[in-house]
Image (cartoon, coloured by chain):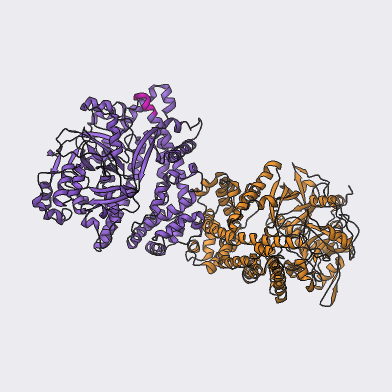
Chain colours: A purple, B orange
């Protein structure tokens, strides 16, 4: 559910997608500083104003990989339950399982401060393409160019922090064809206000994930505090109390994580043949042992759920993406589009000279990457050391190593702009469960042994011993559970790290050189080549057709649009919205058994609920993972729902836009109010949301 | 033999040594810019002139841990055979064992270029005490002060290289009470001219090492080339063809490595109780397995000899030093001297406030050091990885890590001034013998297992496997034998190191963090404290008695003096010189058997030799390890001999000066000429030495 996505298209339009402005499609995750004005005006008669965009932007919240929005002048924030789930779990203990019971703070004093949480709001966007690309000199290799750009980027981000106190992040758009500097305000005092029971939020479970019709109350409410007081602002989204109808224009503001619509066929083939097969097998493996662990008991199930939820979600999403790539007709169309663009470039001698070689260079880079993908994933991406302790240890080690370097020379995530987040992560008091961590580490070490058993580092770490023994020793031996130990190590710098006898720190040190070696290779041979040639292809497109095609998603704030719309699946019409009546009926049919078991609150208050009230609905708004929690508004900017998923048909739209049967799925604004009032008796909260106080 | 030493003293004078100018002793390794003018004038009526000192300095050569001198205007250089031995061995092969056969280049074309050799000549000395100590700020911890001084030192060294092209080395004197900047000219094209057979150079073997009477032709001749031509200079030592007599004043110019006469009793106790016991046991262990290896065959013996020679020499020296520390009367005297000095300081409130705490702070540092001495030695000093390959690997790894840092932030040995030597060491084509290296590494890994088996790094490296298996894999697996591989890694920087799959490089990376951690601890908790408090004690001494007491040896160029002098041992008078007659007689008595076997050349040419010619002699010149190869001259600056040893009684003078029975041992100038002419027929060489061409 973290990775919803949707779009529409008739196959014949595909070439146009790449080469012509898709004037009549709802496609696109548009930049806030380049919204699709003409398109919206022409198709929907909707005039986007700067005021509308500014208000929506300042009401939107980045949840770091997901989205949310302000919905009251007192800092009340709405997102999905599955987005807030980490916080809910971190506030839970063996004896207080908020996932199970749900949570509602009847007064502000009861709101629970979330450990280690950080939210951010985009204050401004600056186009820095000229500055960044100006760092490149003729004759530079891709890696040298990347290095030169990296230094400018680091300087821009640092300057932002110094000048404005805002977090500057340079966003790479069009695979390197465009660079924008995003300036965020950060919030760190976040408190949990309301969460329904997990059974209500994730009704239908993994079985219904990425499906529709759906009946989920996938919401979670937080409140942002500043200086100990609720954060006050006029930039929040007013609630629409009326319903919506088919055909209504909707606008969605969120942080779609990544799409691959502008990738070349060589890049898609890499994903299809190397990246996704490994990822899927890896998720399946984790899913299997976590399910087994969950069966040991209630507490084990509670603990495992933290990871299992995300894994099953990602697994389902990745299988969906892969299904697109395994569809020969999709790949054939991608190839055809690519050939058409290459032909258009080849027609013009200047374009051909500048951009003609980009596709072959990219193909060579993908081939190179395939040759070291596994060690890259196991060492640098730490797949061989799948435990929170290793994440902390590596951050401690690398923070100590990187901090003394000049800002621009550091690994990107340890540059000044990112340090507060890194440090907050290290010091997060979120609970860690050793038995579960041992299980995770055991299996990932076993996998390391299977996949990279002949690497020297693997031999050292395992030395022929059972992975579970090694894992147990590491988990038992580490002192990193104690936040004060982490703090001391962090403050002590590299000297403290080098003198530390903690086995997890030593493990992070042991695999650091090989990991850095692989990363350097990746950055030089793959990433830099992808960026340079992605940029060249983008520039060719700009020359041929301007910037009428929106960039791929990159986790930065985007605007998408679409309409409330039912669709036909296997000859059956699927209605655009579901109701509480449907929810109770679905549960009854399944004998109120997992995954269609309703929480006690829903069962007890059934009589009070107006059953015709809509609970979920769909629209053609373009979205993908990262859009979870995105506010969806009408022409007036009023809140109509919060995006939480895409249907299963929407998954391949990661690569090719489609909207006959693919949809984004939202929790309905009316359903939220109904549940808060009738089931949870959260009248003061509803009053705040509806502005009735 | 690398560690000769000698001095004289009557026990009652001991207090005076510390507290009063030792006006009538021959003690002292004096600074070239502060020679003992008054002492020499008063005691020997010898007026030292600046010209005398300059000429002697520019005629003296640093062999990196040993000494030598120019003895012709055409760059001919004399040192000991045991100093040149590494070069002789590196020029040897299985089929051309120059250790066994000796070597004589009859023409310049026959001279053999020595791989990786570097010699240096001191061009100037600058007192930088003010600059270095000026970096300290009040309130700094010892480690902060060390860091601040280190930055100034690095800058001074770097500036020297940039301004003059000379190698700048800041020498720490009086344990940190004084700092001098030494500026060296470097020579890298060194060719072997003459070496006698090992049997002649080391007649008496380990049995006679550090003994007298002695009959060794411990000499070796090189020639320095510059731009492909023999180096021309007027700064060379003219040969005295006449003999010497008892009582003759001699002056010795060389590079004594280290003495501990100004150490506190706490420092001596550390050596006695921790440092030396480990060192001695370690040398004995190496000696044992190398002897065993030597017995396997001639080639094995040849290969082992390279290390065995140095080990037995160091072992004997260390046992000698330790014998001094184990002598209760010596330690009692040291304590008495220390108490006298402390009492003198305590008498003056100002002195007491400034310097009174120094001794206790030092004692605490020694105690701390004892607690991590073994890991320090096994990891940072690489005792656990005793193979040339590891030395190369560590240098490659650390060079890559240190080079990108600002000069002053680097580990000292990787600062700009030192880089040429480090790089030359890495690229040295000197042969490496894998079977022998495997043996060395096996045993050191076994020792690592025994001593530090519970350290995580040890567990990783050995993983419960037999050390010899691990060692064999490392030696078989490494590609570092190939100099071009080293070159490529060196040129590739850190990225190449991180991507390198060589097991020896990976081992060096694995142990780098723990090694650096221990080194940092040593530098902070021990070295910085020793330096600060050593300096405080020195400053107290300066206040009480000026700089009349020479500093301890530190490997920098020093002048010592003394007289030709026989002595009495066990009631028997030991003559000041030995002759060729004595040599032949000693051999005959032993049946010409090891270690008194003479090479064929000596046996064959016996009739030609004038048997009364002196071969070795002794003097009271103060010396210690590092003085090997030092030229010894008369009042006129004429060459009378080359220092190569001290007698066994001289060893404890590392800590307390003594000269009734301790002596330095020299090869006699006349003996050298006699051997070259009569035994080796090296007439052109003799003509060059005597200036007869």
Q: Is residue A543 rendered to the left or right of residue B588?
A: left
Main secondary structure found in the magenta portion: helix
Front residue of B448 and B620: B620
Quadrant of the frame with the C terminus of chain A:
top left
State which quadrant residue B159 falls in: top right
User: Can residue B677 be seen?
Assistant: yes
State which quadrant residue B527 falls in: bottom right
Front residue of A291 and A392: A392
**Residue B249 belongs to the span the image colors magenta:** no
Q: Which residues are magenta?
A: A539-547
Q: Position of residue A417 (x, y in %)?
A: 43, 43
Q: Is residue B609 above or below residue A268?
A: below
Q: Position of residue B216 (x, y in %)?
A: 80, 64
Tell which residue pokes out farthest to the left in this image.
A607
Q: Position of residue A381 (x, y in %)?
A: 40, 49
Tell which residue pokes out farthest to the right in this image.
B242
x 34%, y 35%: residue? A265
Q: Is residue A331 rendered to the left or right of residue A160?
A: left
x 39%, y 28%: residue? A539
Tell which residue pokes out farthest to the front in this image.
B349
Front residue of B142 and A622: B142
Q: Is residue A109 rendered to the left or right of residue B690?
A: left
User: Can residue B300 be seen?
Assistant: no
Q: Is residue B75 above or below residue A142?
A: below
Q: Position of residue B276 (x, y in %)?
A: 65, 69
């Amino acid at each position: 559910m973290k990775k919803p996505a949707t779009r529409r298209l008739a196959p014949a339009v595909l070439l146009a997608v790449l080469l012509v402005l898709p004037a009549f499609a709802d496609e696109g995750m548009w930049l806030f500083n380049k919204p699709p004005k003409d398109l919206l005006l022409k198709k929907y008669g909707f005039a986007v104003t700067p005021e509308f965009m500014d208000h929506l932007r300042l009401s939107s919240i980045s949840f770091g990989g997901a989205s949310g929005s302000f919905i009251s002048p007192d800092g009340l924030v709405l997102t999905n339950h599955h987005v807030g789930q980490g916080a809910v779990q971190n506030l839970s203990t063996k004896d207080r399982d908020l996932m199970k019971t749900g949570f509602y703070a009847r007064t502000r004093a009861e709101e629970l401060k979330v450990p280690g949480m950080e939210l951010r709001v985009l204050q401004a966007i600056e186009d820095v393409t000229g500055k960044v690309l100006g760092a490149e000199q003729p004759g530079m290799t891709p890696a040298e160019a990347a290095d030169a750009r990296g230094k400018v980027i680091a300087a821009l981000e640092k300057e932002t922090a110094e000048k404005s106190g805002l977090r500057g992040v340079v966003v790479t758009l069009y695979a390197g064809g465009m660079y924008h500097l995003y300036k965020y305000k950060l919030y760190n005092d976040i408190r949990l206000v309301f969460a329904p029971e997990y059974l209500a939020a994730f009704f239908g479970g993994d079985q219904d994930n990425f499906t529709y019709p759906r009946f989920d109350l996938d919401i979670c409410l937080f409140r942002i505090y500043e200086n100990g007081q609720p954060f006050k602002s006029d930039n929040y989204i007013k609630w629409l109390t009326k319903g919506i109808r088919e055909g209504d224009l909707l606008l969605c503001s969120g942080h779609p994580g990544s799409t691959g619509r502008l990738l070349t066929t060589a890049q898609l083939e890499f994903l299809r043949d190397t990246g996704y097969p490994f990822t899927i097998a890896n998720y399946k493996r984790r899913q299997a042992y976590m399910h087994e662990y969950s069966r040991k008991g209630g507490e084990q199930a509670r603990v495992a759920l933290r990871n299992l939820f995300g894994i099953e979600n990602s697994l389902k999403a990745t299988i969906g993406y892969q299904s697109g790539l395994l569809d020969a007709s999709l790949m054939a169309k991608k190839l055809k589009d690519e050939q058409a663009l290459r032909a258009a470039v080849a027609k013009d001698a200047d374009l051909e000279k500048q951009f003609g070689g980009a596709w072959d260079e990219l193909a060579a880079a993908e081939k190179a990457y395939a040759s070291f993908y596994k060690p890259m994933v196991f060492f640098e991406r730490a797949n061989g050391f799948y435990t929170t302790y290793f994440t902390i240890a590596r951050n401690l080690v690398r923070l100590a190593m990187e901090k003394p370097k000049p800002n621009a020379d550091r690994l990107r995530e340890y540059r000044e702009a990112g340090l507060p987040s890194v440090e907050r992560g290290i010091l997060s008091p979120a609970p860690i469960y050793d038995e579960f961590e041992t299980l995770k580490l055991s299996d990932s070490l076993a996998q390391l042994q299977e996949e990279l058993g002949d690497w020297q580092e693997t031999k050292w770490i395992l030395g022929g011993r059972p992975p579970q023994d090694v894992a147990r020793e590491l988990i038992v031996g580490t002192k990193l559970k104690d936040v004060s130990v982490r703090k001391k190590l962090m403050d002590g710098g590299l000297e403290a790290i080098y003198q530390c006898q903690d086995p997890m720190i030593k493990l992070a040190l042991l695999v650091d050189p090989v990991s850095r070696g692989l990363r350097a290779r990746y950055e030089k041979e793959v990433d830099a080549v992808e960026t340079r040639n992605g940029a060249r292809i983008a520039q060719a497109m700009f020359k041929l057709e301007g910037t009428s095609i929106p960039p791929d998603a990159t986790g930065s704030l985007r605007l998408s649009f679409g309409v409330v719309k039912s669709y036909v699946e296997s000859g059956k019409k699927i209605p655009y919205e579901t109701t509480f009546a449907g929810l109770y009926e679905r549960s009854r049919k399944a004998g109120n058994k997992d995954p269609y078991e309703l929480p006690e609150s829903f069962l007890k208050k059934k009589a009070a609920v107006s059953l015709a009230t809509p609970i979920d609905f769909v629209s053609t708004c373009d979205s993908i993972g990262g859009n979870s929690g995105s506010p969806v508004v009408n022409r007036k900017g009023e809140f109509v729902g919060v995006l939480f998923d895409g249907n299963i048909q929407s998954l391949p739209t990661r690569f090719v836009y489609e909207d006959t049967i693919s949809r984004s799925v939202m929790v309905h604004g009316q359903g939220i109010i109904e549940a808060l009032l009738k089931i949870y008796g959260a009248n003061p909260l509803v009053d705040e949301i509806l502005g009735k106080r």
